[in-house]
Image (cartoon, rainbow, N blue to C red):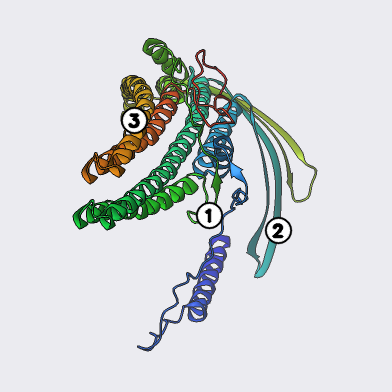
Amino acid sequence: MKSVILIRLFRCLALIGFLLGLNSCHFFLPTPPSPPPPSAKRPLTPTYSCTSPTVAPVVPDESEVLPLIDLLDIALQNSPATRSTWYQAKMAAADVGSARGAYLPTLNFTGSWMQELFAEVDSGEEIVTKEKNAKASLTTTYLLFDFGGRNGNLLSAIAALDSLNWSYCWEVQTVMIQVIQSYYNYINALGTIGVDEATVYDNRVTVEAATARRKTGLDSLSDELQARTSLLQSQILLEQDIGILKVAEATLVQALGLPADTPISVAGLPENLVTEGVCQDMTSLMELAKRHRSDLNAMRSGVMDAHFQIQTARSALLPSMDTSITGSKQSLNDKKFVNAYDMQFNLYVPIFNQFTNLNNLRKAQANLLATQAELDNLELDAFLQVVSDYYELIANSQVLDYSHEYLKVAKKNQEVAFANYKVGINTILDLMTANNALYLARQYLVDAKTQFLTSLANLAYDTGTLRLCDITEEDGVVLIDEEGDDER
């Protein structure tokens, strides 16, 4: 009789729930939207809002003349790339904390309260009985051993954190080299403008001399027109290089982490650069790169991470054991609580799981070999960069020395050619040739300075020794630390 009453009660509750469900569906079904009229325009703004914390960029004062060291400081504060790698390292640090937590016990609290109603019919009279049950329990669990799985997870997390720390250092140097290259390109564009203006002046003086000789009948109109042609060519080249300068300035500003139209004032380079003893021999530089390049150290930490992942995967094939202790209090029908205690030792032995653990071990072993191969390839690329930039630096230092001599000779040649033209010894073609040689000499010197400084900075970057403390504040020249520094 008791079971029949309960079945009927459940049926009534089910029917009531079904009717309520239909009623809720009637009220909560969404009304299909009506299409907009043909002339109406759909809003382009999304119906949701997505906000993220932003960091206010450091914007320099337009009136302040910034040397290279200050430009680098601004870029490192504004760079989204360095912020990204920094927060990735913080995530890895949290993973280390989670892995260390496996050495601590877990503690869980469980509480429950239940009331049951029982209906009986006795001698035609329905009797309802209430039964209350309250229970509270506290359980602690601790892993006793798992054949190195817990230790492998911790060591793997530490290696991953170390790898990301090195990656952050490499990202800092990458931002620095981008700013340095953009700065030198901008200074080169400024120097090119100076060369163009000097060439325009020389060609204008040549036109004036040709006009004076034509008026006196010493030269023909053709000579004057040739001089004017050279003047117009130099003026066109000046306007083109002004556009290149604006692009170089925008590129530099963008490298600082600022909008490309932000105005800045930049300090120039020294007139004379020292090219002797700027770096060591190539073998020492390759040793520097092997020890101090942050990307190589990050990859080495990645190899260690892959090694510890093998330890973790292997432990999944072996037994593990933990223990748990539970203490509980239980009360029935508001009576006195009954205490209960339980202690268990659990042994887990993996027997068959579709070869998942075995394949995970094989995957971890293959990952170690692949990561080691990536490290070997990265070392070869790094050594090639060192060798290439080393020989470029040697060549550019020689070119810079010759460019100074070339400019001296070209100036003297132009002065002599102009003086001879005025007295009628040389023709207009001789003077125009001398002017063009002087233009090339000036441009060679500007380009030689840029190439020398850029190759010097690239070599410091290739060896992993590009640091703020190795950049001279007065002239913005990168120095290579001959002994290196193990500090990150």
Instruction: Residue 233: tell me if it is visible.
Output: no
- What type is the residue that disc 3 sits on? Thr
Which dot, 1 or 3, sits closer to the camera? 1
Residue 294 appears left or right of 334: left
Other-residue count near label 3 (Cα within 10 Å), few / some / many at <14 / 14–19 / ≥20: few
Instruction: Residue 139: tell me if it is visible.
Output: yes
Identify whether 422 is placed above or below 453: below
Determine which of the numbered discs, if any, sits on residue 356 in the image. 3
Which dot, 2 or 1, sits closer to the camera? 1
How many angstroms separate mark 1 from mark 3 (CA)?
56 Å
Determine which of the numbered discs, if any, sits on residue 262 in the image. 1
Q: Which of marks 3 and 2 is nearer the N terminus?
A: 2
In which quadrant is the C terminus drawn? top right
Other-residue count near label 1 (Cα within 10 Å), few / some / many at <14 / 14–19 / ≥20: few
Residue at the spot 51% in from the left edge and 69% down from the top edge: 14
Viewer-nearest residue: 409 or 470: 409
Other-residue count near label 2 (Cα within 10 Å), few / some / many at <14 / 14–19 / ≥20: few
Task: List x then y, in percent, for residue 483.
Answer: 52, 12
How many angstroms separate mark 3 from mark 2 (CA)?
51 Å
Task: List x then y, in percent, for residue 265.
Answer: 56, 47
Where does label 2 land, which residue?
130
- What type is the residue that disc 2 sits on? Lys
Residue 399 appears left or right of 23: left
Q: What element carries label 2?
A: strand
Viewer-nearest residue: 319 or 61: 61
Q: Which of marks 1 and 3 is nearer the N terminus?
A: 1
Asked if the residue at tag 3 contacts the one at tag 1, i.e. Cβ–Cβ closer than 8 Å, the answer is no
Q: Which quarter of the picture shows residue 354?
A: top left
- What type is the residue that disc 1 sits on? Thr
Q: Is mark 1 on a helix, strand or loop?
A: loop
Asked if the residue at tag 2 contacts the one at tag 3, i.e. Cβ–Cβ closer than 8 Å, the answer is no
How many angstroms separate mark 2 from mark 1 (CA)?
78 Å
